[in-house]
Amino acid sequence: MTPPRAFSHRGEFPGADRDMKADDLREAYLAFFESKGCVRRPSDVLVPRWDPSVLFTPAGMNQFKDHFLGKCKLEFTRATTCQKCLRTGDIDNVGRTPRHHTFFEMLGNFSFGDYFKREAIHWAWEFVTARNWLGIAPEKLSVTVYENDDEAYRIWSDEIGLPATKITRMGEDDNFWPAGAPTQGPDGVCGPCSEIFYRMPDGSDVEIWNLVFTQFNRVGNPPDNLRPLPSRNIDTGMGLERTAAMLQGVDSNFHIDILRPLVEAVAEVCGRHYEPATDDGRRMRRIADHVRACTFAIHENVLPGNNEEKYVVKRLLRRAVLDGRQMGIRDPFLHTLPGTVAGLMRRPYPELAETVDRVAGVIKREEESFLATIDGGLQRIDRLFATVERSGSGLVKGTDAAELYTTYGFPPELLETLAAERNCAFDWSGFREAMEGHGQRSGAGTRVEVFTSGPLDSLKKAMHGTEFVGYDTEQTDGKVIGIIAQDRLCDALQSEPARGAALQGEAARHGQAVTIVLDKTPFYGESGGQVGDTGRLEWAGGAFDVTDTQREGGFVLHVGRLVTGQLDLGQTVKATIDTSRRSALRRAHSATHLLHAALQHHLGPHAVQQGSKVDADLLRFDFSHGGAIDAPTLQAIESMVNANVFAAVEVSARLIPLGEARHAGAMMLFGEKYPDVVRMVSMDGVSRELCGGTHVTSTGQIGVVRIIGEESVSAGTRRISAVTGHRALERFREAERALHEAAATLKVPAAELPARLAALSKEMKDLRRKGAAPAASLSVEQLLAAATDVGGTKVVIADARGADTAAMRECIDLLRRKGSPIAVLLGSREGDKVTLVAGISRELEARGLSAGNWIREPAAVVGGKGGGRPDLAQAGGKLADKLPEALAAARDSIAEMLGT
RNA sequence: GGGGGAUUAGCUCAAUUGGGAGAGCGUCUGGCUGGCAGCCAGAAGGUCAGGGGUUCGAAUCCCCUAUCCUCCA
């Protein structure tokens, strides 16, 4: 990779680490705060599946939410990270401005009730200005503080020594977190912030660092609604890209050392030069940003799809493809770029390199799919322009464009371009209006609160969690440490209604679904795709049926109903799982590992797990794969799985350090955050996976694995369903039973069934053909013989007995072919229903006669209606007795029609 | 999670207001033919996604289900 040209501002920062690389900046920041006692933590995943309030990690503090709220036991009170983030709020600005991104990295240092304002400010200043760190000249820096945060003001002015001209007080919209919180809310933790700005060569001030001092709890509306927090926190964020731009003296984040080569690579695949100030330059930056974001997201197994984070990825990809298309690129090109991204980011994120091929494949498929969508849209567009032309308005209506977009995915920008080529205007305001209407119809989404609190929170502060002993035992004694009913913690659970007054606090009643938390349990809470255990809790005088088990924050939640007795907090209970169901779960889970290994072997290393469900003797396994699996391959996979079952391979599980597991080649999923010590489940020589689930001790116990389905879940993902053990046996029996019944009905051996069925089917077809044809043709001669002549036209009117409409039509066709001019009307009845079909030959049609008109009157006679085309019409009625009358009426009216 | 759309021959898609299920490509058969998609003739191939309803009559209108596409959150 050639070094970027624009790093030319040598001497810009006297005494600074000139041209500091982004990689060095990242490392310097983390090292600096380590020297201040912060624990260096790895970046959290980009897609935090544990956090329902966000689709992507939006800021550095996201992984510390529970720390800030005191919702977990703290292992450290100071931390520093470089966090990969993704935001789409400002997506329209990406490429247009120097500093907007979707994907970016945030450097942060955090304090959980430890250091506060003074240290945060001093250290930030030290890092930015000290010669051996960033060494930025102080005169280029200025700061802001919250309007009445005198504490922060004093630290900046008195302790750091900044002149008053360099400190600005700002209101709650700029210098409070969350913005505007004091007057507008939300309630909860909040605080003032202080920002550090850098004066760019062009004279603009750029914010490089935001220090948030969470020191209040907001309760209600002003005044006096900000209560001091007992435990105050620090949350700071320094944008890596903009700080690097500052250090490297470039005018745009896109021109720093880890981004400019990517922009240049985009230019290269587009076959042109990158010129920053042009429309195409903006497009190239946008493509670079989006492809970088998508490379990271897809790396974490977020594939383009139709909802939530999947949809974000899809939208980013399509925007990028569209930009390419607007520059004249007609073929997939984005997929050539993830390698460049991985190369530029290899120091902080070496794991990206491992998935480049897979990521590129996913992107390519999406590109092709979008190009197909556009092609499909182009056909409709032609029709649209035809109507525009007819109307003579020269305007593409916004409603039409919106329909094309929301229904067929055809981008409005492209439509505008095409319209311009035809000298048509495009109604953007109408389009936006229509889209707003669409958004409203779709229903504004209910936003999940950023900080949710639940009944478990107070438990989390007091205890580490439930001890799970279910790997080795199926029964244990445990103490009740929590009872949750109707989303609240209770002190007791009673089986008789209306005795609550006798109990302390809230009491949950008999019959309701409630949750019991124990300090120790053999129950497996649903996770890793394996569904929760069922079973029973028992104690002297009482019992509780567990119908499901879940997990949350280290606690095992036993969900179920009280059967008898009363349950109090602190009670010791005997917890017993349903052992036969658990055995079935073990079989299915171990079979899943065997299946995963077999898929990798037969399809290749790209066939990695996407999702999994393990139920009793039943499993569903989703994995990445391009297309359907052909029958022989599927059979080979099933055979391999069963060969490993028959071989009775020993299964073992042990806890080992993460690094060791990686070294041992254990299957790991990207985008999963693993703890430092992991549980590795090994099937000797066949499979090694990190897995918290329960397994058989020998694969032989699985019995047999039968694949029962292979299907698509979404583009690029396939799903295999299979049964094991008892359920497999039951399936074989059912199939055999059905086969025997069929064989008995046809009185042939089961093996001859297919041949016999084929013969029968053919015979039936032949019979049907023979039966239909002669009936129609036989009568033709008779009908023609019985035709009357009305003024030179043959008229055939007859009761066709049981013939159906198709036969009558055919008959009319034959008659028309044999003699014309001719008019034919046939009637037929079945039960109390009458069907009439009328046809006239071409000459009569030319004379202005119409079969549709002709049939109207006889149809009325039989109590019905009818119609059709001029040369052939049909009708029906319900008065079967009147068929002769109807035919007579038909004779009269045709005579009249011909006579005039 | 919600809005819109689609599902017809092996494939790509047509079918005016409800009135006879079609085309191109592919397949098969026969014939012609030195040529890059050879030509001509003929044939086979359909539960109009599935189920219910309205109607004399439904590929077409209404409802439900399934699958896919698409937009919004």
Image (cartoon, coloured by chain):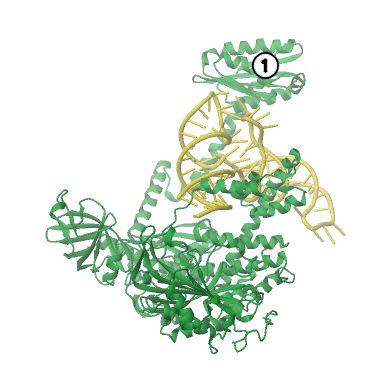
Chain colours: A green, B yellow
Q: Is residue A407 above or below residue A146?
A: above
Quarter of the rendering containing residue A762: top right
Q: Is residue A353 above or below residue A725?
A: below
> Which residue is at 59% across, 32% downward?
A770
Q: Quadrant of the image for the N terminus of chain A?
A: bottom right
Q: Quadrant of the image for the C terminus of chain A?
A: top right
Work out which residue is located at the far front of the displayed protein and give it. Answer: A164
Q: Position of residue A443 (x, y in %)?
A: 49, 48
In this orientation, which residue lies closer to the viewer: A75 or A562? A75
Q: Is residue A569 visible?
A: yes
Q: Report the chain holding disc 1.
A: A
> Which residue is at 42% across, 71% downward?
A63
Q: Position of residue A404 (x, y in %)?
A: 63, 48
In this orientation, which residue lies closer to the viewer: B60 or A731? B60
Q: In this view, does A877 lie above or below A262?
A: above
Residue under label 1, please give it. A796
**Left or right: A361, with A39 as reference point:** right
Q: Position of residue A573 (x, y in %)?
A: 17, 64
Q: In this view, does A305 lie above or below A675?
A: above
Q: Which amino acid does label 1 sit on?
A: Val
**Left or right: A734, with A259 as reference point:** left
> Which residue is at 43% across, 42% downward?
A746
Quarter of the rendering containing residue A394: top right
Q: Position of residue A392 (x, y in %)?
A: 76, 40
Quarter of the rendering containing residue A22: bottom right
In this orientation, which residue lies closer to the viewer: A389 or A792? A389
